[in-house]
Image (cartoon, rainbow, N blue to C red):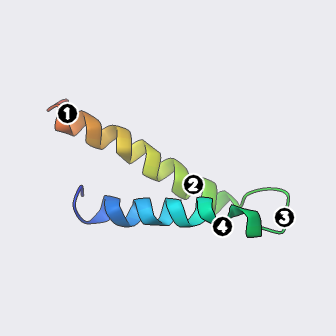
Amino acid sequence: MKNVFQPLNQQTAELILRNVDLIEDEDIPTAFLNALSHVHAYNAILAQWENNDF
């Protein structure tokens, strides 16, 4: 998870955030918000795992 999926998830989040200005609608699409939430939630989980806090 830490070495394979999370780096890809982080790249996805960065891509969304770098290009959010290209969205023509006033609202950010739900799929983008879900992806960002997922990435940041797993950042917290991975930090807990680093501390052996399962």
Kindly identify which residue carries mark 3.
25
Does 15 sit left or right of 28 as displayed? Answer: left
Residue 15, disc: none
Q: Amino acid at mark 3?
A: Asp
Q: Amino acid at mark 2?
A: Asn
Residue 51 screen position, x and y as percent: 17, 31
Count of numbered labels shown in the rendering: 4
**Residue at the (61%, 63%) spot, across then down:** 18
**Residue at the (37%, 67%) spot, across then down:** 8
Residue 28 screen position, x and y as percent: 73, 57
Kindly identify which residue carries mark 2.
34
State the image quarter where residue 17 is shown: bottom right
Q: CA distance from mark 2 to mark 3?
A: 17 Å
Question: Looking at the image, do the residues carrying marks 4 and 3 touch, with CB atoms under 8 Å apart?
Answer: no
Q: CA distance from mark 4 to mark 1?
A: 35 Å
Does 20 sit left or right of 42 as displayed? Answer: right
Whichever of callouts 4 and 3 sits on the residue coming sooner in the sequence is: 4
Whichever of callouts 2 and 3 sits on the residue coming sooner in the sequence is: 3
Kindly identify which residue carries mark 1.
54
Residue 46 screen position, x and y as percent: 27, 43
Q: CA distance from mark 1 to mark 3?
A: 40 Å
Q: CA distance from mark 4 to mark 3?
A: 13 Å
Kindly identify which residue carries mark 4.
19
Whichever of callouts 4 and 1 sits on the residue coming sooner in the sequence is: 4
Quadrant occupied by the N terminus: bottom left
Question: Looking at the image, do the residues carrying marks 1 and 3 touch, with CB atoms under 8 Å apart?
Answer: no
Whichever of callouts 1 and 2 sits on the residue coming sooner in the sequence is: 2
The residue mark sitting in front, 4 or 2, is 4
Quadrant occupied by the C terminus: top left
Whichever of callouts 1 and 3 sits on the residue coming sooner in the sequence is: 3
